[in-house]
Image (cartoon, helix red, strand yellow):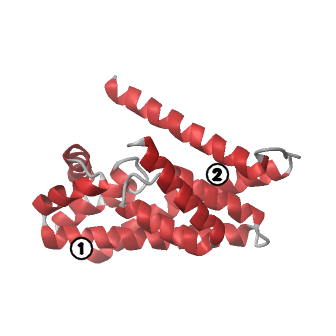
Amino acid sequence: MDLAIFSGLTEYLEALITLNLYGGAFLAALLETIFPPIPSEIIMPLAGYLASLSDYGYLGLLIVTLSATLGATLGAILIYYVSLKLGRRVILKWGKYVFISEENLSASEKWFEKYGKKAVFFGRMAPVIRELISIPAGLSKMDFWKFLFYTLLGTFIWTLFLVSIGFFFGLYLDSLNLSGIFGKTGVFIIIIIVAYILVKILIKKFKKT
């Protein structure tokens, strides 16, 4: 993914979540599901971190998680119906504009063939597969209510995991007396971005071996 696009999307969603935490988490998760380049591994921990700064405590953690889960689920439903109605050829034709490649789509289809309906549940927690698993579900005409159930469950678990990372790390940073040019929020964002880049590098190296 182009670094400028990555930075622009991340900065936009960071500002959105900062402005309106719960609504921002919902919209960020919706966009992340529809446009795969948006990194939920950065956006969701940021939402969790900001929740740790609120006065709602663990209730804030839960509300952010539910907001993001609903946003991601809505995005998954949209992709499911587009795939169901339009078919694979149209998905590949227009999917390139949202960074959906035939290679990644084929990987999600193989995942779906291997695990069946449960692929939707596990796929919502797997890198690359997560944003695309709704496509083979729609193409195969999977029962909608089963798709919704597995999507909600898998999305909730994955979102809770990511949001909790930011939330509890935020509580830890709050116990430190950080100040200066970056402050707590700046330190948190830098750490999350660096961790995300390192994980991406490790995944690429693992695929080559």
Q: Is residue 31 left or right of residue 108?
A: right
Pick whichever of labels 1 and 2 is earlier in the sequence.
1
Quadrant location, the N terminus: top left
Please tell me which residue is depicted at 62% across the width and 56% down the height of the picture.
46
Q: Quadrant of residue 107?
A: top left
- Which amino acid is tagged 2? Ile
Q: Which labelled disc corresponds to residue 81?
A: 1
Query: How far apart in space, not on screen, are marks 1 and 2 (Cα)?
Result: 32 Å
* Residue 183, visible in the rendered structure: yes
Q: x, y (%) of residue 209?
A: 34, 22
Residue neighbourhood size for the residue with mark 1, other residues' Cα within 10 Å, grouped as few (<14), some (14–19), many (≥20): some
Dot 2: few (<14), some (14–19), or many (≥20) neighbours within 10 Å? some
The residue lying at 39 percent from left, 74 percent from top is 74
> In the image, residue 136 lies at what x, y percent?
21, 59
| Residue lying furthest right | 177
Question: Quick one: SS at disc 2?
Answer: helix
- Residue 8 in the image: x percent, y percent? 49, 53
Circle 1 SS class: helix
> Which residue is pictured at 17% across the width and 55% down the height?
92
- The residue singled out by tag 2 in the image is 165
Vertical placement of residue 206 versus 119, above or below: above
Instruction: State which quadrant residue 56 falls in.
Output: bottom right
- Horizontal side of 31 relative to 132 (left or right) equals right
Q: Is residue 56 left or right of residue 16?
A: right
Q: Residue furthest top?
A: 209
Amino acid type assigned to the residue bearing label 1 in the image: Tyr
Q: Residue at x 72, y 67 (%)?
A: 58
Residue 152 visible in the displayed image: no
The relative height of residue 199 versus residue 50 in the rendered view (above or below) is: above
Relative depth, front residue between 135 and 37: 37
Quadrant of res 171: bottom right
